[in-house]
Image (tube, rainbow, N blue to C red):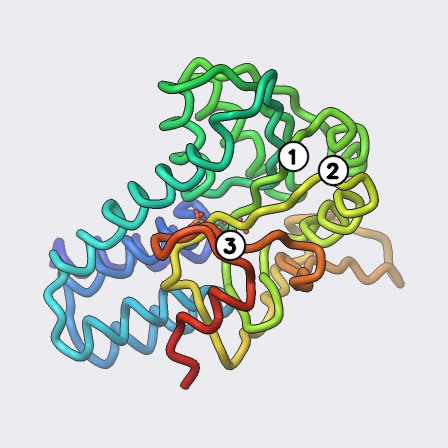
Amino acid sequence: MVGKKGLQQIYTDIKIVKIQGATNIAKAAVRAWRLAPGATTEKKLLSLRPTEPMLAHVVKLLEEGVPASEVMGHFDSAQKKMNAEVEKLLRGKKKLVVMTHCHSTNVLKALIALRRKKKFSVVHTEARPLYQGRKTARDLSRAGVSVETFVDSGMDEALEKADVVLLGADALLKKGVVNKVGSEAIARLASLRRVPVWVVADSWKFAPKGVKIEERDFDEVWAGAPRNVRVRNPAFEFVGKRFLKGVISELGRKSWDEFVKAQKND
Ligand code: RI2
């Protein structure tokens, strides 16, 4: 009975974005599977966040019989490799300012690991409507990193200060990345300003067939909007590879095409 309640709680927390970010969602899926392995759990988990291929990848592995402990072990070992690659990329730069958007566990952990090796500061945007950027600011501040917060529409002001942009990812596609809404404008403006944009993401987010972009409840944006106003809330958007230097994953730092080549494309 306790297990069932725990399971419902995991589903709700994923749905309402209390559990947020591709990695945390995938880890929660493993916890759900441990409570109730099988087809019903699989179906339910897959219905919760359509833009999260890592969730689908993890469920597939569990369904094929890969032990939950092995799946869980992947996340930490992949993160360590991403941390090392981010350090290699950024260690030479003096007076480093890193820009990021929303909240990405992969980006955050890499930055927190970098903090032990060199001094840098972060500029970031809030990521309306759920203000997930504030979690980024809190996590970095706790780790002793100086942070400047900008509203989303101040993204160009933030970019003016940045030496590099590190974006997380929900889905890595053949032709670019799907990430939190706002990422595309940031990447386009960064390319005008010649600020390099790297995606830091676990390769388990690769989705060769693409993903459905999740449009969330309009209430998150404007509850009680006037009649005739249709409030839109697409949570993610696609950023083409031409705006990206490439992807930093546990497979190393690669251009987009090199990364895609290293994947199984079925
Ligand atoms: P991790 C988030 O989406 C953001 O789009 C973020 O860039 C991505 O997940 C990062 O994933 P949401 O699920 O690096 O919180 O945390 O809406 O795996």
Number of labels in the image equals 3
Image position, residue 137 (x, y; %)? 53, 25
In this view, 119 is above or below 48:
above
Quadrant holding the C terminus: bottom left
Give amino acid for label 1: Glu
Q: Disc 3 or disc 1, which is closer to the eye?
A: 3
Which of the two labelled residues, at mark 3 and mark 1, occupies the earlier sequence position? 1
Numbered circle sitting on residue 247:
3
Q: Are marks 1 and 2 in contact (CB under 8 Å)?
A: yes
230 with respect to 243 (left or right): right
In this view, 52 is above or below 116:
below
Residue that lies at the very extreme toward the bottom in this rendered image: 266
Q: CA distance from mark 3 to mark 2?
A: 23 Å
Give amino acid for label 3: Val
Q: Does residue 5 show up?
A: no
Residue found 27% across the figure and 76% down from its top: 60
Residue found 46% across the figure and 73% down from its top: 261
In this view, 30 is above or below 62:
above
User: Alpha-carbon neighbours of circle 3 within 10 Å: few (<14), some, or many (≥20)?
Assistant: many
Q: Are marks 3 and 1 in contact (CB under 8 Å)?
A: no
Give amino acid for label 2: Asp
Q: Choose between 170 and 97: the one closer to the eye.
A: 97
Q: Residue under label 2, please give it.
A: 152
Image position, residue 46 (x, y; %)? 38, 72
Residue found 42% across the figure and 63% down from its top: 205
Q: Are marks 3 and 2 in contact (CB under 8 Å)?
A: no
Q: Residue under label 1, please give it.
A: 126
Looking at the rendering, which quadrant does residue 178 occupy?
bottom right
User: Alpha-carbon neighbours of circle 1 within 10 Å: few (<14), some, or many (≥20)?
Assistant: many
Which of the two labelled residues, at mark 3 and mark 2, occupies the earlier sequence position? 2
